[in-house]
Amino acid sequence: MINAQPNSYQFLVGTYTKNTSAKGIYSIQFDAALTPKTSLLAALDDPNFLCFSPDNQFLYSLTAKANETGVSAFKIEQDKLVFINKVDFGFNPGACHVSASNNHVVVANYGEGSVYVLGRTSDGSLTSVVQKIQHVGSSVNAKRQDKAHAHQAVFSPDFKYVLVSDLGVDKVYVYKYDATNLSSPLSLAQEFSVKAGSGPRHLTFDKAGKFAFLLHELDGSVSVLGFKNGQLKLVSSSTVVLKNDIQTGAADIHLSADGRFLYATNRGTANDITCFKVAKNGTLSFVQQVSVEGNGPRNFAISRDGKFVLVGNQWTHAVTFFRRNVKTGMLTFGELRVDLGSPVCFLEY
């Protein structure tokens, strides 16, 4: 594991490199005074989404070049990323999310509306694709929902299930995960339908795996979903759309480490981040909505200690920094922007 200096913070940043100044995976290190240092750790094409292995010893990155989509594996060492291997999917544009268990790496492919499962070995290397699941269907938004668009594939906290949000068909697919099954580790447990035209994008679990908080890209709604024995059930709904006459493009959603506050970004013409307080029954109450001080907040991260939030503004090519009140959940812009071509994913390490 790469270690930051005492009293400092360190994040990996995935980027889009096509037609930007970015060259791959970066490290951003900063201290409590918000003095930043940026360095390139791995040069590769469009490492747009990243994930750690469960033991945090390995990193997996989506890559894309000339419509060739794949996943690259890296060993995390003291001050660098050491390339292990790469598996390509061929002509398969649109891979947008990757998650890892001890035995597999799962990829959601937006363009194809599919899910890929790759094997993962003890040395961190990737095997070929062991399973592919193709979603089919459409929904009411003719421009965005003409076919399936798998947007995220995430393991439940207990690693017994994989949940796939499909924007194109307005469903969350719940797959039972069997790490010992060599050919078909995923099997369908539930197709959970959401509001037509809402476009489910990303979800995040509470630590206990009791609730999943689902952000819908197309209408900006936030669904609180109860989760038990592989089944989702709607608990309540909220929204990040609080202004009139804006274009909505809700993007990313995360809980604070203590589970008390939920945050979600909205792109389009809103370009803001909304904070909700989370009740014990999972329901949400509005706390604050502030500008992200940039355009296109595709992804963001909350520091482990809860004191800082980093927002990746894809369209204005900058990371903006916010101080966070751990008691109230409220954010204050830290008056810091770090220029970086199309930042779109953060992992603290």
Image: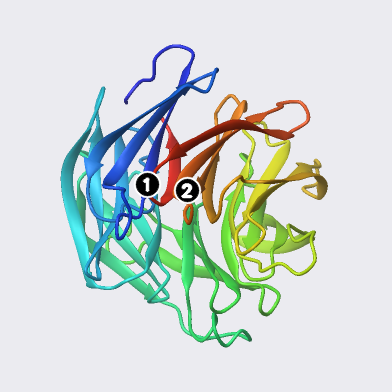
- Quarter occupied by residue 236: bottom right
- Drawn side of residue 169 relative to residue 333, left or right: left
Nearer to me, 250 or 183 = 250
Residue sitting at x 39%, y 74% = 111
Measured from the top left, where is residue 217 in percent x and y?
61, 66
Residue sitting at x 66%, y 69% = 247
- Name the residue carrying label 2: 159
Nearer to me, 83 or 272 = 272
Measured from the top left, where is residue 187 in percent x and y?
44, 68
- Which label is found at residue 14? 1
The three-letter amino acid code for the residue at tag 2 is: Phe
Q: Secondary structure at mark 1?
A: strand
The three-letter amino acid code for the residue at tag 1 is: Gly
Q: Taking 121 as reference, is 142 above or below it?
A: below
Residue 121 showing in the rendered view: no
Nearer to me, 299 or 295 = 295
Measured from the top left, where is residue 129 in percent x and y?
24, 64
Residue sitting at x 64%, y 59% = 215
- Quarter occupied by residue 59: top left
Q: Nearer the viewer, mark 2 or mark 1?
A: 1
Q: How is the image coloured?
A: rainbow
